[in-house]
Amino acid sequence: MLVIVVYRFPSTRPPADDEKVFWQRYATLWQTRVFIASAYDYQQLVQFNSREVVFAPAQPGVGPATVRLALPATLHLADRHSTPEVTITKNGHPSLAAVYYQSTLRPKLLYKLSIKMGWGGYELEDVPV
């Protein structure tokens, strides 16, 4: 009798992959909301809190539905002063903001999310603690 053993790969991703997926999903949602604001004249809000990032229309019921992007378990808002909300105006220009995140995978660095003037610009950079 021939015995065949099937190896099953773990179904969970490493925590570092969760953060990478979060930032990729954030980029997609951000670009989509900038496009919607400028193409359809629907002002958008992006709210940052300790559990999630919320992408919502400025006027409820006008524009696309609210989307909630949960933070991965390894990522938390840092103690530094972060802007809790960004407005993306009807021309696609966001309000200036800085949001800091701390990763348990990188304890000596912070992620600094800088929302810049201009058509939907932002930058994600590492900042020493």
Image (cartoon, helix red, strand yellow):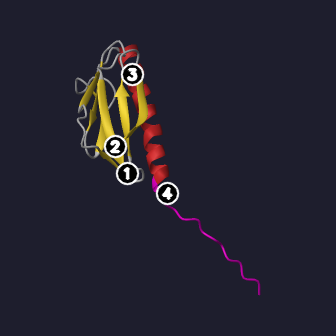
Q: Is residue 114 magenta?
A: no
Give amino acid for label 4: Pro
Height in image: 51 above or below 58? below
Q: Secondary structure at mark 1?
A: loop
| Dot in front, 2 or 1 | 2
Gap in Å between the C-alphas at discs 2 and 4? 24 Å
Three-letter amino acid code of the residue under disc 2: Val
Nearer to the camera, 7 or 123: 123
In this view, 124 is above or below 4 = above
Spatial distance from mark 3 to mark 4, Cα to Cα?
31 Å
Mark 1 lies on residue: 107
SS at circle 3: helix
Q: Secondary structure at mark 4?
A: loop
Task: Depth check: give the residue in front, 109 or 28.
Answer: 109
Earlier sequence position, callout 3 versus callout 1: 3
Q: Quadrant of residue 89?
A: top left
Q: CA distance from mark 3 to mark 2?
A: 31 Å
Instruction: Identify the magenta region.
Output: 1-15
Percent of width and height locating residue 61: 25, 26
Instruction: Look at the image and say whether residue 8 sits in the magenta stretch.
Output: yes
Q: Position of residue 33 (x, y in %)?
A: 38, 25
Q: Give the residue pinned by disc 4.
A: 14
Report if residue 66 is visible in the image: no
Residue closest to the eye, 31 or 20: 20
Query: Circle 2 sits on which residue?
Result: 129
Mark 2–mark 1 contact, CB under 8 Å?
Answer: yes
Per the image, the residue denoted by label 3 is: 34
Q: Is residue 29 above or below residue 68?
A: above
* Front: mark 1 or 4: 1
